[in-house]
Image (tube, grey):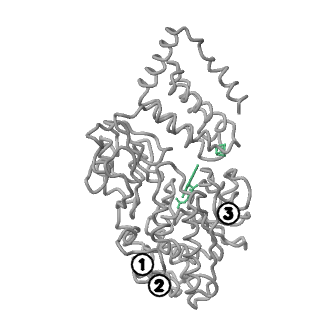
């Protein structure tokens, strides 16, 4: 649905091509809607109707948390008298994720159309696309796309004679993962450091950009709105599975034969099919064996090959898990940004985690002590362990730190994001972490190397270093 044209030979990102493929028809439909009389005698505005259709569709956010889009829109404070803003989150920084950029680079008018309809439905007259700094070509293309749309009056004043005005601006980030977190993003858009805001009270729907009601939605989420208007919320809800409706673009990377992005109906394809089916991942490279799967971007808890889960009272093997929001949560992880990273048996699991932990230690914004210090301690311990300076007790040490970061101790969900990989990797592959630390200790003893600092001293050292 979302990628139906993107990779068709001859399909280009320009307006003429988009119009030849029914582009902006959903917008015309939305703007032509008339107020409707309801059975209870009340009337419903076109905007309310679209919002209701989005609710009926069951669309859940594609940015990470999988929150209901219709519900999010229903929280918007429409009585404050302040302007309402909409921000498209095009930061796409979660390691392993490369889906939003396919839309931006290959079918940008689809995003603009989805945004215009979403803005119309929410009485928004000024919207932003916050795009990751590392995508300068995407920003350029989006600016060109906006110009093309404005030239044909799909944007600007009195859009298509409807009386509705809207402007969209592109804002480039400067390459920080935390700018993807919606309140950090808002701070950055206001020209400040992207320090996430505490919720409550700063729920964007009430106190967002410039302390005004603000909707933040992911690129793919907003594209879906175009299709909901085209087919109706109830039809859309038939795609996918109950409570997990529509399609999702899955970024598949790692040790598979055919890494890439694949649009699937949510829940209609299993993790095993995504990895092994010839139309998706095509199996593991060089006939190797599966070791682990990170199912939703690097912050999602890892699955170990051969794991089994209790899903609604039934035992389900990891590879048989339907790739949807709810099944993955029930299996103790999440589909997150729908990025699957496949690790085969050649993977050094300690090094893999050290790599992930280094990323999070670098990207913590530093506001909250547990996250700022904890992410750094975990990274340092893992770097030591990965480079021959570990100890057998490091596994427990790592778990102790990771268990003390999340759970309401931090301002934003980055605290969870940096802890979940450590908690899950160490718990599920503990023998490998312990064995590596033990081997390092034995080697050092043999070499009569001075023992490394005790954990408590290391805390001081790492803090002093920071
Ligand atoms: C640390 C962190 C990074 C995030 N990065 C992104 C991102 O790059 N893109 C994105 O769409 N959402 C990201 N999110 C989720 C956003 O905060 C927000 O929930 C999302 O943009 C809402 O859109 P949706 O409801 O359409 O999914 C991130 C969240 C956290 C905690
Ligand atoms: S949890 Fe981490 S990233 Fe989020 S606000 Fe606190 S220090 Fe910053």
Measured as percent of width and height from the top left, residue 250 is found at: 40, 56
Q: Decide: marks 1, 2 in contact (CB < 8 A)?
A: yes
Task: State whether residue 282 is above or below residue 29.
Answer: above
Measured as percent of width and height from the top left, residue 274 is found at: 32, 51
Label 1: which secondary element? helix
Instruction: Pick whichever of labels 3 and 2 is earlier in the sequence.
Output: 2
| Viewport quadrant of the C terminus | top right
Label 3: which secondary element? loop
Left or right: where 415 falls relative to 433 = right
Q: For residue 29, which numbered disc appears in the image?
A: 2
Instruction: Pick whichever of labels 1 and 3 is earlier in the sequence.
Output: 3
Q: Decide: marks 1, 3 in contact (CB < 8 A)?
A: no
Q: For residue 206, which numbered disc appears in the image?
A: 3
Task: State whether residue 72 is above or below residue 433.
Answer: below
Select label 3 or label 2 by which is in front: 2
Q: Residue at x 61, y 58 (%)?
A: 133
Instruction: Report the residue marked by disc 1.
Output: 230
């Amino acid at each position: 649905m979302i990628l139906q044209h993107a990779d068709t030979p001859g399909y280009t990102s320009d307006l003429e091509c988009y119009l030849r493929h029914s582009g902006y028809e959903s917008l015309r439909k939305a703007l032509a809607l008339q107020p409707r009389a309801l059975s209870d005698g009340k009337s419903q505005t076109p905007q309310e109707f679209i919002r209701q259709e989005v609710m009926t569709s069951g669309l859940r956010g594609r940015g990470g948390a999988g929150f209901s889009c219709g519900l999010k829109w229903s929280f918007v404070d429409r009585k404050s008298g302040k302007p309402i803003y909409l921000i498209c989150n095009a930061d796409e920084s979660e390691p392993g994720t490369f889906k939003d950029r396919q839309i931006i680079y290959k079918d940008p008018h689809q995003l603009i159309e989805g945004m215009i309809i979403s803005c119309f439905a929410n009485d928004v007259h000024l919207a932003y696309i916050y795009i990751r700094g590392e995508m300068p070509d995407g920003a350029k293309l989006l600016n060109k796309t906006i110009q093309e749309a404005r030239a044909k009056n799909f944007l600007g004043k009195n859009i298509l004679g409807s009386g509705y005005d809207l402007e969209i601006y592109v804002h480039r980030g400067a390459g920080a993962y935390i700018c993807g977190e919606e309140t950090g993003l808002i701070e950055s858009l206001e020209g400040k450091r992207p320090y996430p805001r505490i919720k409550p009270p700063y729920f964007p729907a009430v106190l967002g950009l410039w302390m005004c009601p603000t909707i933040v939605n992911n690129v793919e989420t907003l594209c879906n709105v175009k299709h909901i208007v085209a087919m109706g919320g109830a039809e859309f809800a038939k795609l996918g599975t109950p409570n997990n409706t529509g399609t999702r673009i899955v970024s598949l990377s790692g040790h598979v034969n055919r890494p890439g992005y694949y649009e699937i109906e949510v829940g209609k394809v299993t993790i095993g099919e995504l990895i092994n089916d010839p139309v998706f991942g095509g199996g593991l490279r060089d006939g190797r064996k599966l070791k682990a799967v990170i199912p939703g971007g690097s912050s999602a808890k890892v699955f170990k090959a051969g794991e089994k889960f209790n899903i609604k009272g039934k035992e389900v093997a990891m590879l048989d898990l339907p790739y949807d929001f709810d099944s993955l949560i029930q299996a103790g992880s999440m589909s997150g940004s729908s990025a699957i990273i496949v690790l085969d048996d050649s993977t050094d699991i300690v090094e893999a985690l050290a790599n992930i932990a280094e990323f999070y230690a670098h990207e913590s914004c530093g506001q909250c002590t547990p996250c700022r210090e904890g992410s750094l301690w975990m990274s340092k311990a893992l770097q030591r362990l990965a480079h021959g300076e570990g100890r057998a007790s490091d596994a427990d040490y790592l778990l102790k730190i990771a268990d003390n970061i999340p759970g309401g101790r931090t301002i934003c969900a980055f605290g969870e994001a940096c802890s979940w990989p450590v908690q899950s990797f160490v718990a599920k592959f503990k023998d490998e972490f312990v064995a590596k630390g033990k081997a390092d200790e034995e080697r050092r003893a043999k070499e009569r190397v001075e023992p490394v600092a005790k954990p408590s001293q290391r805390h001081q050292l790492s803090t002093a270093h920071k």
